[in-house]
Amino acid sequence: MNILAIESSCDETSASVVSNGTKVKSVIISSQTDIHAKFFGVVPELASRAHIKNINPVIAKALEEAGISFGNFDKKIDAIAFTSGPGLAGALLVGAVAAKTLASVLKKPLIPVNHLEGHLYSSFIENKSVKPPFLGMIISGGHTELIIVEDFGKYKFLGGTRDDAAGEAFDKAAKMLGLSYPGGPIIDKRAEKGNDKAVNFTRPYLKGSWDFSFSGIKTALLNYLKANPVKNEKHLNDICASFRAAVAETLCFKAFEAAKEFDLKRISMGGGVCANSLIRKMFYQEGKKNKIKVYIPSMLYCTDNAAMIGCAAYLKQKTSGLKYTRAQLKSVPSLRLESW
Ligand code: KG4
Ligand code: ZN
Protein backbone atom coordinates (compact mmCIF):
# COMPACT_ATOMS: atom_id res chain seq x y z
CA MET A 1 0.00 0.00 0.00
CA ASN A 2 1.39 3.41 -1.01
CA ILE A 3 0.57 6.38 1.19
CA LEU A 4 1.19 10.05 0.50
CA ALA A 5 1.74 11.55 3.96
CA ILE A 6 1.69 15.21 4.97
CA GLU A 7 3.06 16.73 8.19
CA SER A 8 2.64 20.38 9.19
CA SER A 9 2.03 20.41 12.95
CA CYS A 10 4.80 22.80 13.95
CA ASP A 11 7.63 24.40 11.97
CA GLU A 12 8.45 21.73 9.39
CA THR A 13 6.44 21.34 6.20
CA SER A 14 6.95 17.77 5.06
CA ALA A 15 5.56 15.29 2.55
CA SER A 16 6.54 11.69 1.93
CA VAL A 17 5.55 8.69 -0.13
CA VAL A 18 5.78 5.53 1.97
CA SER A 19 5.18 2.02 0.75
CA ASN A 20 3.83 -0.58 3.20
CA GLY A 21 4.73 1.54 6.19
CA THR A 22 8.49 1.28 6.03
CA LYS A 23 9.72 1.71 2.46
CA VAL A 24 10.29 5.44 2.14
CA LYS A 25 10.19 6.35 -1.54
CA SER A 26 10.63 10.05 -0.86
CA VAL A 27 10.70 12.41 2.08
CA ILE A 28 10.88 16.17 1.65
CA ILE A 29 11.24 18.47 4.67
CA SER A 30 11.15 22.24 4.48
CA SER A 31 12.33 23.64 7.81
CA GLN A 32 11.39 27.09 9.08
CA THR A 33 14.26 27.37 11.58
CA ASP A 34 15.63 30.57 10.01
CA ILE A 35 12.24 32.29 10.28
CA HIS A 36 11.80 31.52 13.99
CA ALA A 37 15.44 31.75 15.15
CA LYS A 38 15.35 35.46 15.95
CA PHE A 39 12.36 34.90 18.26
CA PHE A 40 14.01 31.90 20.05
CA GLY A 41 10.88 29.83 19.48
CA VAL A 42 8.18 29.03 16.95
CA VAL A 43 5.86 31.98 16.19
CA PRO A 44 2.51 30.35 15.28
CA GLU A 45 1.34 32.94 12.74
CA LEU A 46 4.69 32.94 10.93
CA ALA A 47 4.62 29.14 10.91
CA SER A 48 1.17 29.09 9.27
CA ARG A 49 2.23 31.54 6.59
CA ALA A 50 5.39 29.58 5.81
CA HIS A 51 3.39 26.33 5.58
CA ILE A 52 1.00 27.96 3.10
CA LYS A 53 3.97 29.03 0.96
CA ASN A 54 5.75 25.67 1.17
CA ILE A 55 3.04 23.02 1.17
CA ASN A 56 2.42 22.72 -2.58
CA PRO A 57 6.09 22.67 -3.66
CA VAL A 58 6.92 20.17 -0.89
CA ILE A 59 4.12 17.78 -1.95
CA ALA A 60 5.04 18.19 -5.63
CA LYS A 61 8.70 17.36 -4.89
CA ALA A 62 7.82 14.33 -2.76
CA LEU A 63 5.62 12.97 -5.56
CA GLU A 64 8.23 13.70 -8.22
CA GLU A 65 11.02 11.95 -6.26
CA ALA A 66 8.78 8.91 -5.87
CA GLY A 67 8.16 8.89 -9.64
CA ILE A 68 4.53 9.97 -9.31
CA SER A 69 2.72 12.55 -11.41
CA PHE A 70 -0.93 13.55 -11.53
CA GLY A 71 -1.12 11.27 -14.58
CA ASN A 72 -0.31 8.10 -12.62
CA PHE A 73 -1.36 9.25 -9.10
CA ASP A 74 -4.50 7.14 -9.18
CA LYS A 75 -2.55 3.92 -9.78
CA LYS A 76 0.39 4.72 -7.50
CA ILE A 77 -1.22 6.19 -4.38
CA ASP A 78 -3.75 4.27 -2.29
CA ALA A 79 -4.41 6.75 0.52
CA ILE A 80 -3.47 10.18 1.82
CA ALA A 81 -2.40 10.61 5.45
CA PHE A 82 -2.05 13.84 7.37
CA THR A 83 -1.23 14.98 10.90
CA SER A 84 -4.54 15.87 12.53
CA GLY A 85 -2.99 17.00 15.86
CA PRO A 86 -1.60 17.85 18.32
CA GLY A 87 0.12 21.00 17.11
CA LEU A 88 -0.36 24.63 16.18
CA ALA A 89 -3.92 25.29 14.97
CA GLY A 90 -3.06 27.26 11.83
CA ALA A 91 -0.12 25.02 10.93
CA LEU A 92 -2.21 21.84 11.24
CA LEU A 93 -4.96 23.35 9.13
CA VAL A 94 -2.62 23.93 6.16
CA GLY A 95 -1.64 20.24 5.98
CA ALA A 96 -5.20 19.08 6.59
CA VAL A 97 -6.63 21.29 3.82
CA ALA A 98 -3.94 20.12 1.36
CA ALA A 99 -4.63 16.46 2.21
CA LYS A 100 -8.41 16.86 2.02
CA THR A 101 -8.25 18.75 -1.28
CA LEU A 102 -6.06 16.09 -2.90
CA ALA A 103 -8.22 13.30 -1.48
CA SER A 104 -11.39 14.93 -2.74
CA VAL A 105 -10.09 15.72 -6.25
CA LEU A 106 -8.27 12.41 -6.70
CA LYS A 107 -10.89 10.32 -4.84
CA LYS A 108 -8.58 8.74 -2.30
CA PRO A 109 -9.27 7.75 1.32
CA LEU A 110 -7.84 9.93 4.11
CA ILE A 111 -6.02 8.68 7.20
CA PRO A 112 -5.77 11.11 10.13
CA VAL A 113 -2.63 10.55 12.22
CA ASN A 114 -1.80 11.74 15.72
CA HIS A 115 1.63 13.43 15.58
CA LEU A 116 2.71 11.55 18.71
CA GLU A 117 1.94 8.25 16.98
CA GLY A 118 4.23 9.39 14.18
CA HIS A 119 7.08 9.77 16.69
CA LEU A 120 6.11 6.56 18.53
CA TYR A 121 6.45 4.43 15.39
CA SER A 122 9.28 6.38 13.70
CA SER A 123 11.84 3.72 14.60
CA PHE A 124 9.81 1.13 12.64
CA ILE A 125 10.97 2.70 9.37
CA GLU A 126 14.53 1.42 9.82
CA ASN A 127 14.08 -1.55 12.16
CA LYS A 128 12.34 -4.77 11.30
CA SER A 129 12.67 -6.22 14.81
CA VAL A 130 10.78 -3.53 16.73
CA LYS A 131 7.25 -4.53 17.67
CA PRO A 132 4.81 -4.07 20.56
CA PRO A 133 4.81 -4.34 23.47
CA PHE A 134 7.39 -1.61 24.05
CA LEU A 135 8.03 1.49 26.09
CA GLY A 136 7.65 4.54 23.88
CA MET A 137 9.56 7.66 24.80
CA ILE A 138 8.83 10.89 22.93
CA ILE A 139 11.28 13.71 23.56
CA SER A 140 10.89 16.79 21.40
CA GLY A 141 10.48 20.54 21.53
CA GLY A 142 6.84 20.15 22.53
CA HIS A 143 6.68 16.77 24.26
CA THR A 144 8.33 14.56 26.87
CA GLU A 145 6.18 11.48 27.25
CA LEU A 146 6.49 7.92 28.50
CA ILE A 147 3.89 5.61 26.99
CA ILE A 148 3.46 1.85 27.09
CA VAL A 149 2.51 0.63 23.61
CA GLU A 150 0.77 -2.62 24.51
CA ASP A 151 -0.12 -3.31 20.89
CA PHE A 152 -0.51 -1.23 17.73
CA GLY A 153 -2.85 1.58 18.73
CA LYS A 154 -3.23 0.36 22.30
CA TYR A 155 -1.65 2.79 24.73
CA LYS A 156 -1.13 3.26 28.43
CA PHE A 157 0.09 6.75 29.23
CA LEU A 158 2.62 6.71 32.09
CA GLY A 159 3.75 10.29 32.43
CA GLY A 160 4.72 13.53 30.76
CA THR A 161 6.38 16.81 31.56
CA ARG A 162 4.81 19.07 34.16
CA ASP A 163 6.42 22.17 32.66
CA ASP A 164 9.01 22.40 29.87
CA ALA A 165 9.52 19.67 27.31
CA ALA A 166 13.10 18.32 27.09
CA GLY A 167 13.80 20.17 23.81
CA GLU A 168 12.28 23.36 25.20
CA ALA A 169 14.65 23.11 28.19
CA PHE A 170 17.62 22.86 25.81
CA ASP A 171 16.31 25.80 23.74
CA LYS A 172 15.73 28.01 26.79
CA ALA A 173 19.10 27.09 28.30
CA ALA A 174 20.79 28.05 25.03
CA LYS A 175 19.07 31.44 25.11
CA MET A 176 20.34 32.05 28.67
CA LEU A 177 23.82 31.14 27.49
CA GLY A 178 23.66 33.61 24.60
CA LEU A 179 23.53 30.81 22.02
CA SER A 180 21.17 30.70 19.07
CA TYR A 181 17.98 28.73 18.28
CA PRO A 182 17.29 25.81 18.23
CA GLY A 183 19.54 25.35 21.24
CA GLY A 184 19.53 21.54 21.48
CA PRO A 185 22.01 20.83 18.68
CA ILE A 186 24.25 23.78 19.67
CA ILE A 187 24.47 22.73 23.32
CA ASP A 188 25.09 19.16 22.17
CA LYS A 189 28.01 20.20 19.97
CA ARG A 190 29.62 22.38 22.65
CA ALA A 191 29.01 19.72 25.32
CA GLU A 192 31.20 17.29 23.36
CA LYS A 193 34.18 19.56 24.17
CA GLY A 194 33.22 20.28 27.80
CA ASN A 195 33.53 18.72 31.24
CA ASP A 196 30.16 17.40 32.42
CA LYS A 197 31.28 17.46 36.07
CA ALA A 198 31.99 21.20 36.07
CA VAL A 199 28.55 22.21 37.39
CA ASN A 200 26.47 19.90 39.51
CA PHE A 201 22.86 20.33 38.38
CA THR A 202 20.43 18.32 40.51
CA ARG A 203 18.71 15.56 38.48
CA PRO A 204 14.91 15.98 38.75
CA TYR A 205 14.05 12.30 39.06
CA LEU A 206 10.59 12.90 40.66
CA LYS A 207 10.69 9.44 42.20
CA GLY A 208 7.28 7.85 42.68
CA SER A 209 5.92 9.45 39.52
CA TRP A 210 6.56 8.88 35.81
CA ASP A 211 6.32 12.63 35.17
CA PHE A 212 9.18 14.93 34.25
CA SER A 213 10.01 18.50 35.24
CA PHE A 214 12.80 20.54 33.69
CA SER A 215 12.01 23.99 35.06
CA GLY A 216 14.17 23.33 38.14
CA ILE A 217 17.34 22.65 36.10
CA LYS A 218 16.58 25.77 34.07
CA THR A 219 16.31 27.91 37.22
CA ALA A 220 19.47 26.29 38.58
CA LEU A 221 21.25 27.31 35.38
CA LEU A 222 19.94 30.87 35.65
CA ASN A 223 21.11 31.13 39.28
CA TYR A 224 24.47 29.61 38.39
CA LEU A 225 24.96 32.14 35.58
CA LYS A 226 24.06 35.07 37.87
CA ALA A 227 26.78 34.00 40.30
CA ASN A 228 29.22 32.79 37.62
CA PRO A 229 28.94 34.71 34.36
CA VAL A 230 30.43 32.88 31.37
CA LYS A 231 34.19 33.54 31.42
CA ASN A 232 35.38 32.00 28.20
CA GLU A 233 34.71 29.30 25.58
CA LYS A 234 35.92 26.49 27.86
CA HIS A 235 33.62 27.61 30.67
CA LEU A 236 30.69 27.80 28.23
CA ASN A 237 31.41 24.29 26.94
CA ASP A 238 31.63 22.97 30.53
CA ILE A 239 28.22 24.46 31.39
CA CYS A 240 26.72 22.94 28.21
CA ALA A 241 28.20 19.53 29.06
CA SER A 242 26.90 19.69 32.64
CA PHE A 243 23.42 20.77 31.55
CA ARG A 244 23.22 18.12 28.82
CA ALA A 245 24.33 15.40 31.27
CA ALA A 246 21.62 16.40 33.78
CA VAL A 247 18.86 16.24 31.15
CA ALA A 248 20.17 13.02 29.56
CA GLU A 249 20.60 11.19 32.88
CA THR A 250 17.10 12.18 33.98
CA LEU A 251 15.51 10.91 30.76
CA CYS A 252 17.54 7.71 30.79
CA PHE A 253 16.93 6.98 34.48
CA LYS A 254 13.17 7.32 34.16
CA ALA A 255 12.87 5.37 30.91
CA PHE A 256 14.79 2.38 32.25
CA GLU A 257 12.99 2.49 35.62
CA ALA A 258 9.69 2.30 33.70
CA ALA A 259 10.86 -0.47 31.36
CA LYS A 260 12.02 -2.57 34.33
CA GLU A 261 8.90 -1.84 36.41
CA PHE A 262 6.58 -2.92 33.57
CA ASP A 263 8.88 -5.69 32.36
CA LEU A 264 9.26 -4.27 28.85
CA LYS A 265 12.17 -5.59 26.82
CA ARG A 266 12.08 -2.84 24.16
CA ILE A 267 12.31 0.94 24.31
CA SER A 268 11.49 2.84 21.14
CA MET A 269 12.28 6.54 21.02
CA GLY A 270 11.20 9.44 18.84
CA GLY A 271 11.38 13.24 18.64
CA GLY A 272 14.06 15.82 17.93
CA VAL A 273 15.89 15.41 21.26
CA CYS A 274 16.72 11.80 20.26
CA ALA A 275 19.28 13.42 17.95
CA ASN A 276 21.33 14.25 21.06
CA SER A 277 24.61 12.37 20.96
CA LEU A 278 24.87 11.75 24.72
CA ILE A 279 21.24 10.60 24.97
CA ARG A 280 21.80 8.13 22.12
CA LYS A 281 25.00 6.79 23.69
CA MET A 282 23.55 6.58 27.20
CA PHE A 283 20.37 4.77 26.12
CA TYR A 284 22.27 2.22 24.00
CA GLN A 285 24.73 1.56 26.85
CA GLU A 286 22.01 1.26 29.47
CA GLY A 287 20.04 -0.99 27.11
CA LYS A 288 22.98 -3.36 26.77
CA LYS A 289 23.51 -3.43 30.53
CA ASN A 290 19.84 -4.21 31.24
CA LYS A 291 19.22 -6.49 28.23
CA ILE A 292 16.59 -4.07 26.91
CA LYS A 293 16.69 -3.40 23.19
CA VAL A 294 16.76 0.31 22.40
CA TYR A 295 15.51 1.66 19.07
CA ILE A 296 16.37 5.23 18.08
CA PRO A 297 15.63 6.52 14.57
CA SER A 298 18.40 8.02 12.47
CA MET A 299 18.59 11.84 12.59
CA LEU A 300 16.29 12.27 9.57
CA TYR A 301 13.42 10.51 11.33
CA CYS A 302 14.02 11.99 14.84
CA THR A 303 12.83 15.50 14.01
CA ASP A 304 9.42 16.17 12.45
CA ASN A 305 8.97 14.46 9.09
CA ALA A 306 6.11 13.04 7.02
CA ALA A 307 7.64 9.56 6.59
CA MET A 308 6.81 8.74 10.23
CA ILE A 309 3.23 9.91 9.57
CA GLY A 310 3.06 7.56 6.57
CA CYS A 311 4.42 4.71 8.69
CA ALA A 312 1.90 5.31 11.52
CA ALA A 313 -0.93 5.71 8.97
CA TYR A 314 -0.13 2.32 7.42
CA LEU A 315 -0.16 0.61 10.83
CA LYS A 316 -3.36 2.41 11.79
CA GLN A 317 -5.35 1.46 8.69
CA LYS A 318 -4.28 -2.18 9.18
CA THR A 319 -6.12 -2.09 12.51
CA SER A 320 -8.85 0.49 11.92
CA GLY A 321 -9.47 0.30 8.18
CA LEU A 322 -9.86 3.23 5.83
CA LYS A 323 -13.10 4.83 6.98
CA TYR A 324 -12.91 7.76 9.36
CA THR A 325 -15.70 10.01 10.61
CA ARG A 326 -15.85 13.72 9.90
CA ALA A 327 -14.87 14.36 13.55
CA GLN A 328 -11.82 12.08 13.26
CA LEU A 329 -10.71 13.99 10.16
CA LYS A 330 -10.79 17.37 11.91
CA SER A 331 -7.55 19.11 12.95
CA VAL A 332 -7.42 19.20 16.73
CA PRO A 333 -4.53 21.25 18.22
CA SER A 334 -4.86 19.53 21.62
CA LEU A 335 -5.46 16.02 20.22
CA ARG A 336 -4.77 13.37 22.84
CA LEU A 337 -3.27 9.99 22.26
CA GLU A 338 -6.10 7.47 22.36
CA SER A 339 -6.29 3.78 21.59
CA TRP A 340 -7.55 2.94 18.08
O1 KG4 B 1 10.65 16.72 17.07
P1 KG4 B 1 11.07 18.12 16.75
O2 KG4 B 1 11.69 18.40 15.40
O3 KG4 B 1 9.89 19.12 16.85
C1 KG4 B 1 8.90 19.04 17.80
O4 KG4 B 1 7.92 18.25 17.57
O5 KG4 B 1 9.06 19.74 18.81
O6 KG4 B 1 12.09 18.58 17.92
C2 KG4 B 1 12.70 19.84 17.98
C3 KG4 B 1 13.48 19.93 19.29
C4 KG4 B 1 14.09 21.31 19.56
O7 KG4 B 1 13.75 21.71 20.87
C5 KG4 B 1 15.59 21.07 19.43
O8 KG4 B 1 16.37 21.91 20.24
C6 KG4 B 1 15.72 19.62 19.84
O9 KG4 B 1 14.58 19.00 19.27
N1 KG4 B 1 16.95 19.00 19.33
C7 KG4 B 1 17.94 18.59 20.16
C8 KG4 B 1 18.98 18.12 19.30
N2 KG4 B 1 18.57 18.25 18.00
C9 KG4 B 1 17.31 18.78 18.05
N3 KG4 B 1 18.03 18.58 21.49
C10 KG4 B 1 19.16 18.10 22.02
N4 KG4 B 1 20.22 17.66 21.29
C11 KG4 B 1 20.17 17.64 19.94
N5 KG4 B 1 21.20 17.19 19.23
ZN1 ZN C 1 7.33 16.31 16.71
Image (cartoon, rainbow, N blue to C red):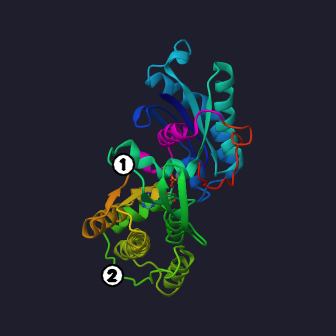
Return the residue nearer the eye: 237 or 145.
Answer: 145
Return the residue nearer the eye: 284 or 183.
Answer: 284
Determine crowd level at label 1: few under 14, some 14-19, many 20+ residues with C-alpha closer than 10 A: some
Q: Is residue 135 above or below residue 55?
A: below
Q: Is residue 298 above or below residue 53?
A: below
Determine crowd level at label 2: few under 14, some 14-19, many 20+ residues with C-alpha closer than 10 A: some
Which residue is disc 1 drawn over?
298
Residue 264, given in percent of the width and then of the height, sits at: 38, 64
Q: Look at the image and give the residue range highlighted in magenta.
A: 298-323
Please say if the residues under marks 1 and 2 sit with CB atoms less than 8 Å apart: no
Classify mark 2 as within 8 Å of ligand 1 or not, answering yes or no.
no
Q: Is residue 333 above or below residue 59?
A: below
Q: Residue at x 49, y 66 (%)?
A: 170
Which residue is disc 2 drawn over?
197
Q: State the image quarter where residue 238 is shown.
A: bottom left
Q: Earlier in the sequence, mark 1 or mark 2?
A: 2
Alpha carbon distance from label 1 to label 2: 28 Å
Q: Is residue 76 above or below residue 81?
A: above
Type of secondary structure dominating the magenta stretch: helix
| Identity, as a three-letter code, of the amino acid under mark 1 | Ser
Residue 233, given in percent of the width and then of the height, sits at: 37, 71
Secondary structure under tag 1 reads loop
Q: Residue at x 42, y 73 (%)?
A: 261
Residue 216, given in percent of the width and then of the height, sits at: 54, 80
